[in-house]
């Protein structure tokens, strides 16, 4: 019987799962990752009390995880790790301030130069061609997955060592563990060294509450990504943005609302899974989303959306530019420049730059409005603030999603010139499952935070068997709904 079972197994296909293929990255919502992670957990439990062996085991698994996402570009991660480990040590050991500055400058040049080459070379070459008309070469450069995330992470470490806020690590395996930690490696959250490194020497401890919260986060993340985000993307949003001129204004408007939910569920879903997996291993990552569409101002939105990035931009770009220390006008300029560069961080396209510029201008206007008018805090002010903020954010998502200004302007034109609200019942009726999930997604998003915490607590009080059943049900639902093709997380491209 065992012989017949072995004959049925396609070992070539199984072994092929361990080899990099650009169309089959190793992501959280695939069956192969689930099986691999269960095997990894078994080994992790055996090594739980063996500090060095455990760190090496997780680091090697993390490098394999990144290899499955970017192929031989995992060597780039190894290179970045070795370089920044040594730069930080040299900076800390140097007694000369001028030498420290030189080392920090070299570190910035290496990191930003690497990011510039892989992400922006063709963008600036095409810009040069557009301005001068001179022919330029087109380089076939593959963007390594997550390079923006781990570059920012290593940069913040070296800068913090230079500022004297943390001590440089003296064991390269500790640093490699910090940089490559697989749950957040390719799409965040961007983890600060000051938050994560103190956890490394401690024995990992998982309380019953931690276990329940981890299960809840992983289940919620899988549901948001693989059920809500992927379904509404494949069955509605992609159709609209692929050719907005074929659809009425109301269909385009619903597509924009759908994308706002899609990108939130996709990215916050990844963050939830990453935080949950890290918690299962005994490590705590910072929260990355706090119901951002509940915001009543654009300033509040950026306190709730992609918190690890917005706080990174604040501490390592906005404040070094001068922050609010050099007058009101300079503060507004600094806000605008910070978000402009934040938009460029997301991708080498003028649409991302426009998205960042819109948010930068809005942050400056919001600061000015709050300073001049000092609006009250009653329910009407909050309602108006929410309506304006939500629709402004959705308007900006058009440029973020469109890819080109032509597509973005088509979407805006259809909404502003061909709205046709009378078509709403017919559109919703034609895509009933899509809009049922959109409605569910927004309802869950607007649940009070207290209710969410109580739900996490309720799951934490359940038995391990009941928690396993909950997670199994969500995985089964994902398998039933997911498309045949793997849908990578949106932020993998950044």
Image (spheres, rainbow, N blue to C red):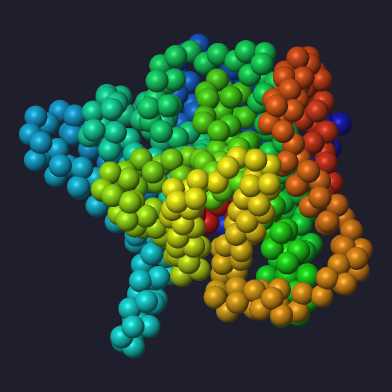
231 above or below 214? below
Which residue is rendered at x = 70% and y = 27% of the image?
450
Residue 373 visible within the image: yes
Left or right of 12, for residue 144 = left
28, 227: nearer the viewer = 227
Relative image position of residue 58 (x, y in whole percent): 49, 28
- Which residue is more in the foreground, 463 or 301? 301
Q: Position of residue 296 (x, y in %)?
A: 61, 46
Q: Residue at x 73, y 70 (%)?
A: 252
173 horizontally vs 163: left or right? right
Residue 52 showing in the rendered view: no
User: Which is more toward the observer, 478 or 455?
Assistant: 455
| Residue at x-position 45% and y-position 35% | 191
Q: Residue at x 86, y 52 (%)?
A: 436
**Tally of marks:** 0
Q: Residue 152 sits in which quadrant?
A: top left
Horizontal arrangement in the rendering, residue 161 relative to residue 485 (left or right)? left
| Furthest-bottom residue in this view | 133
- Is the N terminus in the top left, top right, bottom left or bottom right quadrant? top right
Q: Position of residue 394 (x, y in %)?
A: 63, 59
* Residue 150: image location, x then y, percent: 42, 43
Q: Front-most of 42 and 339?
A: 339
């Amino acid at each position: 019987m065992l012989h017949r079972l072995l004959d049925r197994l396609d070992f070539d296909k199984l072994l092929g799962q361990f080899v990099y293929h650009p169309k089959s990255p190793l992501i959280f919502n695939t069956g192969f990752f689930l099986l691999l992670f269960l095997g990894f957990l078994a080994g992790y439990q055996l090594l739980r009390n063996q500090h060095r062996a455990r760190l090496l085991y997780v680091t090697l698994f993390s490098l394999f995880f990144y290899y499955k996402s970017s192929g031989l570009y995992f060597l780039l991660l190894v290179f970045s790790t070795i370089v920044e480990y040594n730069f930080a040590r040299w900076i800390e050991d140097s007694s000369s301030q001028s030498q420290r500055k030189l080392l920090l400058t070299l570190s910035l040049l290496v990191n930003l130069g690497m990011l510039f080459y892989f992400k922006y070379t063709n963008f600036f070459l095409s810009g040069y061609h557009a301005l001068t008309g001179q022919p330029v070469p087109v380089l076939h450069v593959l963007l390594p997955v997550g390079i923006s995330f781990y570059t920012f992470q290593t940069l913040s470490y070296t800068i913090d060592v230079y500022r004297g806020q943390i001590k440089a690590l003296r064991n390269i395996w500790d640093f490699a563990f910090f940089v490559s930690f697989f749950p957040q490696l390719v799409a965040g959250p961007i983890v600060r060294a000051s938050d994560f490194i103190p956890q490394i020497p401690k024995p990992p401890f998982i309380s019953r509450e931690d276990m329940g919260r981890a299960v809840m986060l992983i289940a919620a993340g899988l549901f948001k990504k693989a059920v809500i985000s992927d379904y509404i993307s494949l069955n509605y949003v992609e159709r609209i943005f692929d050719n907005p001129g074929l659809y009425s204004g109301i269909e385009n408007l619903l597509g924009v609302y759908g994308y706002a939910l899609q990108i939130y569920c996709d990215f916050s879903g990844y963050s939830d899974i990453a935080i949950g997996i890290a918690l299962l291993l005994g490590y705590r990552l910072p929260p990355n989303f706090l119901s951002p569409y509940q915001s009543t101002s654009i300033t509040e939105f950026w306190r709730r959306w992609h918190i690890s990035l917005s706080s990174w931009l604040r501490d390592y770009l906005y404040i070094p530019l001068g922050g609010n220390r050099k007058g009101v006008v300079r503060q507004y300029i600094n806000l605008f420049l910070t978000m402009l560069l934040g938009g460029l961080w997301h991708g080498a396209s003028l649409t991302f730059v426009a998205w960042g510029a819109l948010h930068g201008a809005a942050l400056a206007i919001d600061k000015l409005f709050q300073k001049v008018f000092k609006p009250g805090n009653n329910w009407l002010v909050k309602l108006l603030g929410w309506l304006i903020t939500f629709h402004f954010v959705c308007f900006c998502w058009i440029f973020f999603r469109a890819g080109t200004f032509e597509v973005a302007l088509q979407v805006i034109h259809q909404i502003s010139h061909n709205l046709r609200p009378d078509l709403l019942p017919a559109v919703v009726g034609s895509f009933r499952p899509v809009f049922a999930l959109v409605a569910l997604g927004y309802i869950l998003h607007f649940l009070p935070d207290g209710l969410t915490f109580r739900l996490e607590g309720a799951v934490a009080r359940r038995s391990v068997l009941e928690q396993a059943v909950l997670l199994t049900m969500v995985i089964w639902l994902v398998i039933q709904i997911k498309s045949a093709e793997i849908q990578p997380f949106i932020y993998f491209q950044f």
